[in-house]
């Protein structure tokens, strides 16, 4: 069982994964300078669980094993569990200022449990006990599981089976009595390389013609036939420069990868959906609802860091008492807390599924996410306003360290004389990281597209809002019911 | 005890109040065409409590009497009580499309209970039992109580005692062994004329020099020396025209009044604060927090009506399937539910006070209200967009009823031929009411200024947000704590 | 020739129009309390032309007669003419704080001149000289002409000839050698009752099946068969109350009417389009472009008044030095000037048509209007923020005049003691008028729908923006042209 | 005289500048991979001037020499010149998708000409002829001149002479009969390294105590004592990777540098202000006005590229016909053209200064810039929305070129099969560049802070808006002038 972050690193060292980056296959990925920050962020999910002050938030008694497990592996058994999830996510956002990558797995577990239970009820299958057995293992070992949902999709107007290339969505290509073989790719795979397991799920609702695409299953992250290709991020190679300042967030970061499945074998006991197309849509929707609410936690935590950095840099620059600066900070707080309020409300309004596992409120979860596609952008804009132009014109830390020009830069780029110039450097680099660098990938573009692009949320809002009830209220007030 | 809405009307008939409107003293205010809609809205707080489907939301077991009481008179004993309050408010908004006026009293009770308890603890006074005795009476009789907080204020740069005229904030002008005499005025008094009781409270934090202004007490709404002056609203006199269409919302409406206190006597047993200036600020803040969260319920209910009306009128006009119309409706829903999410979150995150009564989460309550100063305006703008120009160019209902031109207007102002022209008339008049008429007073300007103007919320956000913690997060991530 | 505003009033007294309001036929409309303010606003277009300081802006040498004419009757002969039009409109907005109603005619002239010229070139007709003869008469007599474009439209999914009722768009119902007979209605007719002439035009692009709907012609506003039905506005009957304060803007206002054409005869010499369906779309588009840019003038002028009122009331209330108040005023100015900048740019970038008359830049005109559907709403919201809650809770002026309560209201509703309470009353009533009353009809809803609803502007933007050129730029920068 | 871009490169090769980057002194900066793209962008200002289609926009007859000169060296002699400047800037933005760096110099010339003329009029000095002689030389040689205004500023609450370190603003440290010696630094120096000349100006208004800081003068960019330190940008080192795709914009880019002045000698004939503190504020304000309007050209051109890229990538991904995608593109166009309209209006409304050189309209120039601090952010957000998540998760071009995984990435990351995967790669990298990479530095943060941060614009709006006139309008309408 993985308990400490060192256990976690060690557990990964034992996994041989094929990983490509910049056209080369990576050997020691656990120590790789590009990957390490993202691994550190996952490691925080272990480390905080050992922190007595956070143990209540980070761990919970499992309904499967009766033991205390890391909340990232838990099936939520109450609305309080849903709320604690959001609070845990905010905490981790505050501690890492990036995506800590373990939420997709958690949100997948909770969706898959509910849907497999429903399948078993309706089809007489035994997917749910099979899945719960798997999850008990995950809980006991405290594993990191990558929920792999998004297919490349090719031409978005065509269904999986209509595509020119049938592999553009992951599918079952062969089958034998022991198991199935899957082929395809999953894109935008957050933290994939830092995972022990890959939990494959369909990426959209499916029709009968798409039968082979209705597949949910788990494979070890180092299974034969899996290749990872590391995704680039803005300013990513600053991590390779050796310094600690220009990178903005030296310790932490996120990553996404493309996962290629080259006819990967999955033993039958790890298959949780196999051609039951009618459940694919529900699974996606349930997962998405959980994950959309999650953003009301994690992005709020990152927002806290950005707000804090903006205030700190204002202090260094001597502007923190200006009315317009204070007003901008208040606006940032307001937007950030609005996101949090939505995440909390979606959680508190959750309800028990027949499986016993709790589901988030779908309408409010989509409201949360739709706000997440907007407010972080405005928070980032305000942070850049407060930061000032030096945010994007400051020389490199190597220049600050140069014998000739270093002292000159120290002299000229000082703010108020209370603070050393380096404090200004570090804070501006952090703001740059979060609004125009690797951190901006997670804080902005992932806020836009993670768990579905904004149009997906709008479609759900149109579906979930009870428009008839609203119209009925209006007709009654307008005198068109009794008096019409 | 008042049970039915007819009881309520009858109870008011027994009260002789001095009320002025348009320069004349009003006699039978209970039947007055201007006031009746607002009285109907209050009556709904009784009527719905008798509706078996709503009884759980509308009533609750009192911690004071052990009996089931109307929730508007209740001291919240759990976060679920706080949540149910918001849900009840949304329901009433949906049923009345206006301000139903009974929230200020409820929010005042909950603030006053907490503060008087604290006073007793710290001062050895007996204000809390006194107040609870009063409230038990309110619960038992099921009374409507106007929470009277806002003073005229005069020159806002000056404190009450510094004003040229000392009466610009309500104060104790005399005192004898039986009680006190108060003078001054309270403005923006929502539903004052429909109330049985006036609960006077200070309107701002106070200093020692303002001692006589630190007064909280209850008086019957028809006490000697009280005069009400009815406040005008946009399009108010449509209520006097006799029709049922142009008024937009024939049944319901809100009202505000100026209350003049001409040396009104208050017996000592109904005095709950008497010159303890140090508690005035807390009382205002606690009340404001409750009331700010309330707007995450009531305005959302009114928003539901407006959204429903917009969809209904689009249907009449044959535009309901246009992509841009559907998108605008989704946006309206999104904004409306964002407000609701904030109101819910502030409630769920509430916590028990030493008095046992539950307090709302202050930060989230202020976030709720600040959003309320924005989103209803955008919802209204979108409703006007969907409604089309006829919203403000349609002839009067009397024209539609005219023998010569009525049929011509019916002919020409029809939408799709599925619906009679009158349906369009009524829906447009409802949208006009809510966005540019009497309903707009409550839905827009009251959303802006009720429970304090937006700047008041910003000041509270600045105070309640833990900016130091955010800065600490940022400094840590920036390497300025360990590595600085 | 009409020179003074008294001439103008006199000229209208000579016209017998059938006008309905509140179900009754109006006799002396020139002196009617409901209509008078709107007539006063039109009268300002004469009055300012006699003001030596404004004569350059208000009058211009006619290319038709060589004489100096009121600019509202002019065919623009240069981009400077287009610019001066916008500046004149801002001036009139500042002087009336409402719609002064004479722009639709002016914008119609300029569209019709260009299109009739094109028709003559292509068809060999003589519409343009006919129209110019008519316009020379309008210029010489200095007439007010209502441009009548918007049909009721019925079911918006159907073309005019497809409607269940063929009269839902104005059409030629009969014809003889002397002229044509038209039937139908025009809605949202700004200032119709204050006009000397009605200039009828088609309201949309037409297909061959809609031939009888392709009609442009002029009729005297009191022609037999024309009936006007006055449109209601928020708070409209305050004009009938006799006071000068609660009405907000005592002197000025706008109005819209429905015009019913009951088989109205039009002599052939006043017919400028007769079944040439292929030109209907161009005419509408050209008119709309001019009128959309006009809003970058008139609404900006009204905005100036609202901004001024907000600052003035802040001064009365003693808040004018608060940082957040100053910031809101700056924001209002910024938004208002952004609208003006768009109106100016659309004008300066205009170009000469083959007819010699200048056309506005279509893309920028639509940009102007689309901003006008947004910024006035935000300006209004900010004005309400600055105004405070008394905006919607203040008693009537009759109450202020009452012997008993008047002095009490004066006492309690004073702001800083520098100013009498009446100043506060008047300013708040003006802000109420502009944001929630009759003025709000023009400043807000007309800004939304006048000259076409926002979706119409978006469609034009999609059509007029050179998207291919933008894509070509992008492909080149992306290395997809030379290097692809 | 520099005519072609090759002349330009050659001219720079002849200049020995001390340049630091990443802690090392750069030798051949003209060929340096980091600097080359920015140099290419400047080169476009020469290249387009040789393009017959653009010669009217790019060149103009000089009022100084009577010869046709590059517009970037011109003193605007008409509002048409001001307009053409904005149009030229939009063109260059479209052709480079970055900052082309030559505007600051141009805007400085026009400010300095007006202010030196005024100085001469008032002081009897001969600064203007001296400056014009200098400028004639610049025109004749067709030089690139860096306008150097922004000082490091240190503690913003203190004036230059109050700072702990007197060097935090550039100042005269010594003087002899031949000239002056200046010390200090200028930050955010756009294109400094690509310049032939540095035109130093004061960076703020000054008081008598700051006499030595009131200095304007020109020095060759390779004068003794000048050191440049290159500023970092997001993703800057992608330029060093050798590929052509991941860099997003292979050909073009901007740069900023810190310039250190180590007691640099300036001969007297190149000194244009020397301790006349009273003119410093005017100079800054005039420059800022010109430069703020400039953003209504250049950023609009970059916006065109981003809009084009968004449409092109939608086409590749098969979403270009979705209603919401089309609507987002329209919104982007609308915002972009709103900026352009402001830039044009500020130019058209310019006016002649006593020097003959034309000044921009200050109010509208500030309105332009304030919109520039907002709209590009929203355009960028919409571009990211349209782009989809692959924008930030796509593997490197080296991975696409790898023998094993390259073909797999080609296979899986294809969009519609009409286009090769590389087209998608290139377009997404361009959007990444502009919204989260080196291009985002110029398109976003420079839009925020260039020519002054938004608060500076707000302060100018408060100063330039005629608030008294607006208040007077309001008082008149409210009946407070005649009737008060």
Image: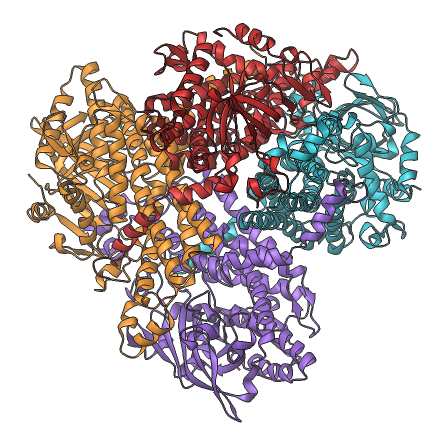
Chain colours: A red, B orange, C purple, D cyan
Q: In the rendered view, does D266 fall on the left or right side of C132?
A: right
**Of B2 and A62, the residue lying toward us:** A62
Q: In the rendered view, does C345 fall on the left or right side of C415?
A: right
**Of D3 and D476, the residue lying toward us:** D3
B365 over C288 or under it: above or below: above
Quadrant where the C terminus of chain B is found in the figure = top right
A122 over B358 or under it: above or below: below
At which x and y percent is residue C185?
A: 42, 75
**At 36% across and 49% down in the image, what residue appears?**
B307
**At 28% across and 24% down in the image, what residue appears?**
B282
Quadrant of the rendered structure where residue C342 is? bottom right
Quadrant of the rendered structure where residue A388 is? top right
Quadrant where the N terminus of chain B is found in the figure = top left
**Of A391 and D465, the residue lying toward us:** A391
Work out whether residue C447 can be spotted.
yes
As drawn, the residue found furthest toward the front would be A177
Q: How many marks?
A: 0
Work out whether residue A380 can be spotted.
no
Q: In the rendered view, does D227 fall on the left or right side of A237?
A: right
**At 64% across and 52% down in the image, what residue appears?**
D341
At which x and y percent is residue B277?
A: 25, 24
At which x and y percent is residue A406?
A: 74, 14
At which x and y percent is residue A301?
A: 48, 23
């Amino acid at each position: 069982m993985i308990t400490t972050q060192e256990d976690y690193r060690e557990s990964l060292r034992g996994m041989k994964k094929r990983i490509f980056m910049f056209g080369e296959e990576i050997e020691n990925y656990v120590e790789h300078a590009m990957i390490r920050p993202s691994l550190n962020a996952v490691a925080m999910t272990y480390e905080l669980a050992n922190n007595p002050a956070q143990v209540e938030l980070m761990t919970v008694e499992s309904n499967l094993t009766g033991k205390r497990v890391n909340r990232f592996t838990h099936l939520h058994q109450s609305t309080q569990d849903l709320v604690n999830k959001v609070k845990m996510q905010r905490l981790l956002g505050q501690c890492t200022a990036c995506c800590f990558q373990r939420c997709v797995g958690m949100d997948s577990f909770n969706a898959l449990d509910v849907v497999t239970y429903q399948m078993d009820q309706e089809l007489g299958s035994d997917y749910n006990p099979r899945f719960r057995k798997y999850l008990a293992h995950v809980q006991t070992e405290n594993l990191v599981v990558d929920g792999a949902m998004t297919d490349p999709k090719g031409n978005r107007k065509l269904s999986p089976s209509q595509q020119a290339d049938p592999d553009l969505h992951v599918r079952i290509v062969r089958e034998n009595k022991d198991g199935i073989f899957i082929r395809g790719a999953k894109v935008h795979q957050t933290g994939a390389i830092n995972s022990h397991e890959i939990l494959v799920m369909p990426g959209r609702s499916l029709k009968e013609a798409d039968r082979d695409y209705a597949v949910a299953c788990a494979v070890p992250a180092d299974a034969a036939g899996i290749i990872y290709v590391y995704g680039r991020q803005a300013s990513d190679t600053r991590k390779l420069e050796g310094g600690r300042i220009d990178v903005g967030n030296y310790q932490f970061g996120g990553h996404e990868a493309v996962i290629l499945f080259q006819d990967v074998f999955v033993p039958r006991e790890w298959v949780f959906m196999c051609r039951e197309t009618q459940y694919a849509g529900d699974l996606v929707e349930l997962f998405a609802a959980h994950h959309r609410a999650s953003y009301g936690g994690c992005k709020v935590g990152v927002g806290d860091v950005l707000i804090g950095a903006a205030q700190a840099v204002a202090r260094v620059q001597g502007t923190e008492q200006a009315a317009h600066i204070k007003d901008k900070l208040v606006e940032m707080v307001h937007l950030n807390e609005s996101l949090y309020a939505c995440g909390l409300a979606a959680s508190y309004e959750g309800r028990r599924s027949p499986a016993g596992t709790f589901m988030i409120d779908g309408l409010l979860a989509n409201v949360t996410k739709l706000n997440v596609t907007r407010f972080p952008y405005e928070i980032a804009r305000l942070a850049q306003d407060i930061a000032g132009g030096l945010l994007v014109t400051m020389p490199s830390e190597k220049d600050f360290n140069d014998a000739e020009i270093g002292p000159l830069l120290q002299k000229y780029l000082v703010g108020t004389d209370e603070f050393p110039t380096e404090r200004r450097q570090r804070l501006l680099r952090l703001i740059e990281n979060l609004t125009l660098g690797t951190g901006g990938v997670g804080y902005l573009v992932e806020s836009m597209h993670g768990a579905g692009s904004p149009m997906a949320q709008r479609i759900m809002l149109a579906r979930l809002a009870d428009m008839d009830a609203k119209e009925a209220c209006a007709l009654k007030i307008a005198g068109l019911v009794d008096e019409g």
